[in-house]
Amino acid sequence: MKTNQAFKRVVKKLSAVRATLRSDERKALDNIIVDEVAAHKMNLAKTTAKSAAKASAKTAVKAHKMNLAKVSAKSAAKASAKTAVKAHKMNLAKTAAKSAAKTAAKAEVKAHKMNLAKTSAKASAKATAKAAAKVA
């Protein structure tokens, strides 16, 4: 409010001084005032370009900004996936022990397995010996 009143007083005084000046002096005063006003005038084209550049820079920064909620959700998903993989992972130490036990069991079964070819040859030899003993 005070600056508005001061502005009005200055304009009124300048108008009074301008009225007392000759025409060439008025032109000089007008040139001084116009040049001074032009120097302080806001360049709107430059300002809008500058604000557009700032806005695009803010957009670029926003695009590269890390979304913490998304990152924490992503890391939680990765952790649960790792847990699932670990649950389905083959335990090699347990597997080696199990395969060794299976091999030992197979060897034991093989030792107790009846050899049919050997048995039939033995049986036929016994039968031949019995038959020969009866005949003799």
Image (tube, rainbow, N blue to C red):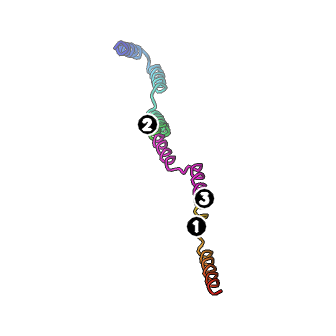
Q: Quadrant of the N terminus?
A: top left
Question: In this figure, which residue is indicated by the disc labeled 1?
Answer: 113
Residue 9 magenta-drawn?
no
Label annotation for residue 103 = 3
> Mainly helix, strand or loop, the magenta region?
helix
Which residue lies most toward the bottom here?
135
Toward which corner of the image does residue 134 lie, by quadrant?
bottom right
Neighbor class of circle 1 (other Cα within 10 Å; few <14, some 14-19, many 20+) is few
Quick check: 10 left or right of 111?
left
Toward which corner of the image does residue 3 lie, by quadrant?
top left
Say what secondary structure mark 3 lies in: helix
CA separation in Å, label 3 and label 1? 15 Å
CA separation in Å, label 3 and label 2? 53 Å
Say what secondary structure mark 2 lies in: helix
Quick check: 51 left or right of 109?
left
Looking at the rendered structure, the kind of residue marked 1 is: Lys
Do the residues bearing badges 3 and 1 touch, measured as CB atoms within 8 Å? no
Asked if one can make out residue 45 in the rendered structure from this viewpoint, the answer is: no
CA separation in Å, label 1 and label 2? 66 Å
The magenta segment is 74-103
- Of labels 1 and 2, earlier in sequence is 2
Label annotation for residue 69 = 2
Neighbor class of circle 2 (other Cα within 10 Å; few <14, some 14-19, many 20+) is few
Report the residue at 62% width, 78% height from top. Answer: 126
Looking at the rendered structure, the kind of residue marked 3 is: Thr
Say what secondary structure mark 1 lies in: loop
Looking at the rendered structure, the kind of residue marked 2 is: Ala
Report the residue at 46% width, 40% height from top. Answer: 76
**Percent coordinates x, y for residue 121 in the rendering:** 62, 78
Q: Is residue 27 above or below residue 6?
A: below
